[in-house]
Image (cartoon, rainbow, N blue to C red):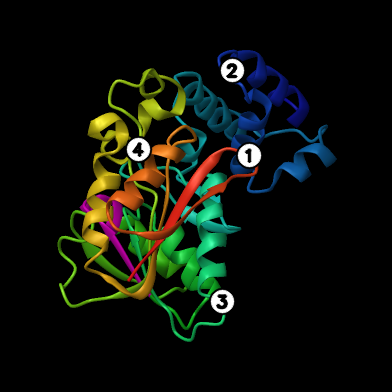
Amino acid sequence: MLSIADALKTAESKLVDSDSAMVDAEFLLAAVIRSNRTYLKTWPEKLLTDEQYQTFNHYIERRVLGEPVAYILGEWEFWSLPFSVTPDTLIPRPETELLVEQVLEIVRGKKAPSIIDLGTGTGAIAIALKYERDDADVYAVDISEGALKTARQNADRNNCKVHFVQGSWLSTVPQDKRFDVIVSNPPYIAPDDPHLSRGDLRFEPDTALSAQDNGLADIIQILEQGRQHLNQEGILIMEHGYDQGAVVRDLFVQKGYQKVEGIKDFAGQDRVTLGFFS
């Protein structure tokens, strides 16, 4: 039997292609022993059972092949809430919490705001918003039936009532339905971007990552459809690539949005753009 410390050290030596080898190993081992990373650091001398080590080693072998930790575990955390994840969904990322923060600020003081999340995936954005604003009328759209199944499960898991709609962006939302906020983290990577064939992105659904027109096709479609579904002074806000800020702001203006604003993430990169439509 190996100790926690020895098991982690062995795992780290196998994960030579990971930039976060020890962190990956700690997440996987913590899940195996049904504890947390703090426990691993507090009790490094604790011995693993043979069954625990076999399961951990299996997880490490999957990670060696490049499979994301979130898919191995079947869940990930976003906005301090637990979310089930599957290969049908993108893995919720910390930088996307900026969208949630901005939407919450936009609807601060507004009674029973109406919000729709386009391309919801795991439901992370919509569910986080509903969790913080139970009075909000929250809708979430995805074209993938598999993604919506996972999103519904996550809504139930976090005790949040969200209205789910299957379709391409706003195409299946009733024409007379209006929202105070449309929020989206759409595909924005160009199809020929080499990053798509590297690291965790190899395992995530391509349709949720890349878009035609240098990654701008879906952004343009959302901007066009959004005009028919915003209340007076409604706001459309979306995430995009760190190097797309100027182009996306121009697209907002071209499509008739006003008071267009870019918002930087914690790394100082252009990450979010918003605009009003009246």
Mark sitting earlier along the chain (1/2): 2
Q: Nearer the viewer, residue 63 or 196?
A: 196
Q: Which amino acid does label 4 sit on?
A: Tyr
Please report the bounds of the magenta region as a residue range: 138-148
**Sequence order check: which comes first, mark 3 or mark 4?**
3
Give the label, 3 or 2, closer to the camera. 3
Say if the magenta span includes residue 142. yes
Q: Is mark 2 on a helix, strand or loop?
A: loop
Residue on which the image places disc 4: 188
Q: In the image, what residue occupies the spot 59% across and 40% down?
A: 32
Q: Name the residue under label 3.
A: 108
Distance from disc 3 to disc 1, alpha carbons, whole Å, reads 25 Å
Kind of residue at disc 3: Arg
In the picture, the quarter occupied by the N terminus is: top right
Mark 1–mark 2 distance (CA, rounded to whole Å)? 30 Å
Q: Residue 15 carries which label?
A: 2
Quadrant where the C terminus sits is bottom left
Packing grade of label 4 (10 A; few <14, some 14-19, many >=20) is many
Mark in front: 4 vs 2: 4
Check disc 2 and give the amino acid type.
Leu
Q: Is residue 37 above or below residue 8?
A: below
Can you give x and y, in whole percent of width and height, for residue 224 in the image? 22, 55
Which residue in the structure is indicated by mark 1?
268
Among numbered discs 1 and 4, the one appearing first in the sequence: 4
Count numbered badges in the picture: 4
Ranked by sequence position, the earlier of labels 4 and 2 is 2
Q: Is residue 106 left or right of residue 147?
A: right
Q: Are the residues tagged 4 and 2 within 8 Å (C-beta)? A: no
